[in-house]
Amino acid sequence: MTDFAAVRARCADFPPADEAAAAAVRARQATLTKPPGSLGRLEDIAAWLASWQGRAMPRLDLVEVLVFAGNHGVVAQGVSPYPPAVTAQMVGNFAAGGAAINQLALLAGAALRVIPLSLEAPTGDFTTDVAMTPDAFEAAVMTGYDAVDPGADLLCLGEMGIGNTTAAAVLAAALFGGDGADWAGRGTGIDDAGLGRKRDAIDRGLARHRAVLDDPLAAAACLGGRELAAILGAVIAARVHHVPVLLDGFVCTAAAAPLARLVAGGLDHAMIAHASAEAGHRRLVEALGMVPLLDLGMRLGEASGAALAVPVVRAALACHAGMASFAEAGVTDRA
Ligand SMILES: Cc1cc2ncn([C@H]3O[C@H](COP(=O)(O)O)[C@@H](O)[C@H]3O)c2cc1C
Ligand SMILES: O=C(O)c1cccnc1
């Protein structure tokens, strides 16, 4: 097993949060015409943007949505009600503008890019094989890394890949413990028998690869998928380039999770945009110690929840940048 040197090297020197920028935001917030703290998480979002962009006054001029697509050998185990051909068909639908993410990215004022990863060659079935060789894994991570525009002000991440809720569940189990019964959900809507097959596939995958699962990168290579690896690479690149990240639902969060195991605070520049209805997401979010922004019962993927959270982030910045201070407005402060 390789040591994944290319990936580890990019995680070696993460820039810290810009505490001075965050402090400047907090200081300005104290002067704005509202009771202290009354904008709740909007105030936290403004400080988070500042601390990871490294700007006392954050900006949201360039918001990017990256959707990575991949196919999964584990679909041979009957874990999704849809055939793998749907992955490429949906990539076509993204290009034609017909998917949910097209509408949500438009509404968010975000540029959407879709990046298919070798859809014609599914990853290995993790119940019988490794999903990816170390080289294939590192190549997918670097595809995601290189896809990030270093000039972006905010990055939304998501995925498309039939079968990938199974890959995400087994990866979450490998990283945080538990088994198929703990982590498998119904994904696109699999029936009870299919859910049973999914749990069983996860348990067999964990047993097969047990020896290497202490290493989060080895776990992601053996059990994950190319689009999950690319999301991990994009989250790493975003940290290096001072770009705050909105993660989508269960699959996207699981894809990014190895970074939290690899580097303490490795996901501090990311927020989870929404609590997916996919069983397992709440458990994963808790394991990461994060709190999703929205909770709308969505379970789509495609970065849909991440794009939908962009207007909330824009609202946080609009209030922060545009509100008057007590002095400017002639409003009496509580003092
Ligand atoms: C038409 C269609 C559009 C989608 N958009 C996202 N997904 C979502 O569902 C898939 C994962 O669910 P499972 O593990 O059950 O296969 C992923 O492609 C995910 O992005 C879709 C699924 C379908 C069928
Ligand atoms: O939350 C997700 O990421 C999700 C849920 C169901 C299907 N695809 C993705």
Image (cartoon, helix red, strand yellow):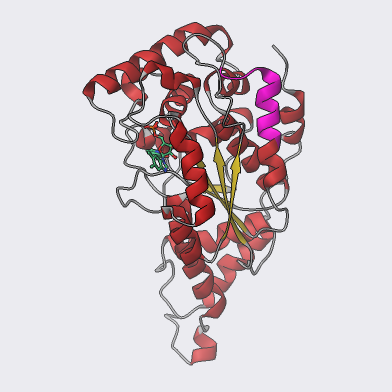
Q: Position of residue 168 (x, y in %)?
A: 46, 29
Answer left or right for 197 relative to 46.
left
- Quick check: 147 above or below 324? above
Question: Which stretch did the figure color magenta?
Answer: 131-142
- Quick check: 220 above or below 210? below
Answer left or right for 25 relative to 87.
right
**Along the line of sight, which residue is nearer the eye, 254 or 284?**
254
Asked whether the viewer can see residue 286, the reply is yes
Write down the quadrant of residue 23 in the picture: bottom right
- Quick check: 164 above or below 194? below
Q: Position of residue 136 (x, y in %)?
A: 67, 23
User: Farthest residue toward the bottom?
Assistant: 330
Answer left or right for 84 relative to 280.
right
**Along the line of sight, which residue is nearer the eye, 54 or 226?**
226
Residue 308 covered by magenta stretch: no
Quarter of the C terminus within the rendering: bottom left
Quarter of the N terminus within the rendering: top right
**Along the line of sight, which residue is nearer the eye, 294 or 159?**
159
